[in-house]
Amino acid sequence: MATLLVNKRICFMAFSRSVTQVFSLSRTKLISKNALHTRTLCNATVDSGVQYLARGNSKAIAYRTHHPTDMSSSSLPGIVFLTDFQSNMKEPKSQALESYCQQKNIAYVRFDYQGCGESHSDLTDATLTDWKGDVLAVIDELTAGPQILVGFGMGGWLMAQAAKERPHRVQAMVGIATWADLPGSVDKWAKPKQAQELGEPKESFHVKAPDFSFFMSQKFSHDIQKHSSLFEDDTSSKLAKCPVRLLHGMKDDHVPYNSSIQLAQHLTNRDVEVVLVKSAGHRFDQPDNIQLLFEMLDYLIYGAEEARKLAISSWTAFSVYSSQHRHNPYV
């Protein structure tokens, strides 16, 4: 059973190869109940100290970790955040998640891919294969026990690949604006003729996508052709059978929200939920969006009953929040 939640409405969809049933419930008080607490986490600047993980050939990726201080929570899964295409670990969701893990006493890792952020390598030398290897190295060398992978944009594609390679280590996946057709999209945009038209060196060029542009090396362009879309049957059938939650903003102008819906339809495991937020864009980093992410993680980590108790507790905290700041008209 896969679930599709849309802002103002909740729709439960049974996905197989086609949608067979749709049920609706009014949605009045599900999101924004812990806005004050969430704003604190969103605005927090977390810096646990950058460290480096060697990746061979004098390359190293930068990472930050949080380790639980109370061993009573050692049975809980850790969380690994995989950021978007050519992004870095300082983006808002990544830092908010570290605050969440500190409060929950949960292990957490965020990192920069090769060539990005504070990592010691050149972006022109990085490939999608390298970035997939970075994710696997982080799981293998920086974490212990089961993990929940949270992937943003391209990170959603990478988390699915990592779950396929390390199914015994991945307990659940949470995708945010998952770029499921990453290889197909980039390969279509990154044609060598673009470099010639722009008068740039053939070794590297800027790619003009429909709604944004980005730097691309010929090495990356050639490498990405080796990889497959998550929509392909032989790929989706091999993905891990763990619980999957896919969050997507309906105002996303980079990755269409249909990407998450189609991915849910292709996945063969039954525990898949798609959550669409009508007011959210690609970054999915507003307080309400972050709170929804936290609620999803509570459910995956603690189970439905405990997550319900946590939600009720957050509603109580929300009641002291000044009414003038309640921007959600449905509260």
Image: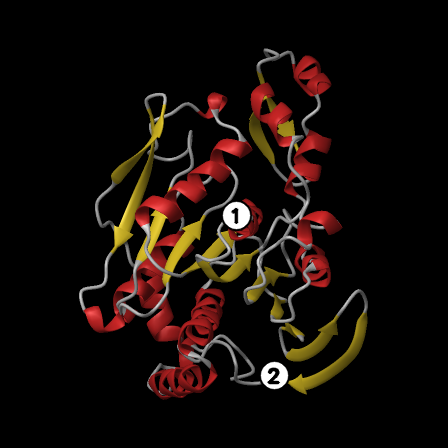
Please report contact status of discs 2 and 1: CB closer than 8 Å, yes or no.
no
Label 2 sits on residue = 27
Residue 326 point in image, percent of width and height: 45, 78
Residue 249 point in image, percent of width and height: 60, 60
Please say whether residue 90 is visible from this viewpoint. no
Tell me how many marks there are: 2
Indicate which disc, 2 or 1, sits on the residue closer to the N terminus: 2
Position above or below: 330 against 179:
below
Task: Name the amino acid type tagged 2.
Answer: Arg
Relative placement, left or right, of 226 versus 59 is right
Q: Nearer the viewer, residue 78 or 103?
A: 78
Q: Quadrant of the N terminus?
A: bottom right
Mark 2 residue crowding within 10 angstroms, few (<14) / some (14–19) / many (20+): some
Residue 228 point in image, percent of width and height: 67, 40
Residue drawn 33% across the image and 86% down it: 320
Residue drawn 32% across the image and 37% down it: 62
Please say whether residue 326 is visible from this viewpoint. yes
Query: Rounded to the nearest whole Å, what is the CA distance between mark 2 and mark 1?
Result: 38 Å
Mark linked to residue 165? 1
Position above or below: 120 against 305:
above
SS at circle 1: helix
Position above or below: 166 against 19:
above
Tell me which corner region of the image, top left, top right, bottom left or bottom right, holds residue 315.
bottom left
Mark linked to residue 97? none
What scheme was used to colour the molecule? secondary structure
Tell me which corner region of the image, top left, top right, bottom left or bottom right, holds residue 121.
top left
Task: Name the amino acid type tagged 1.
Answer: Glu
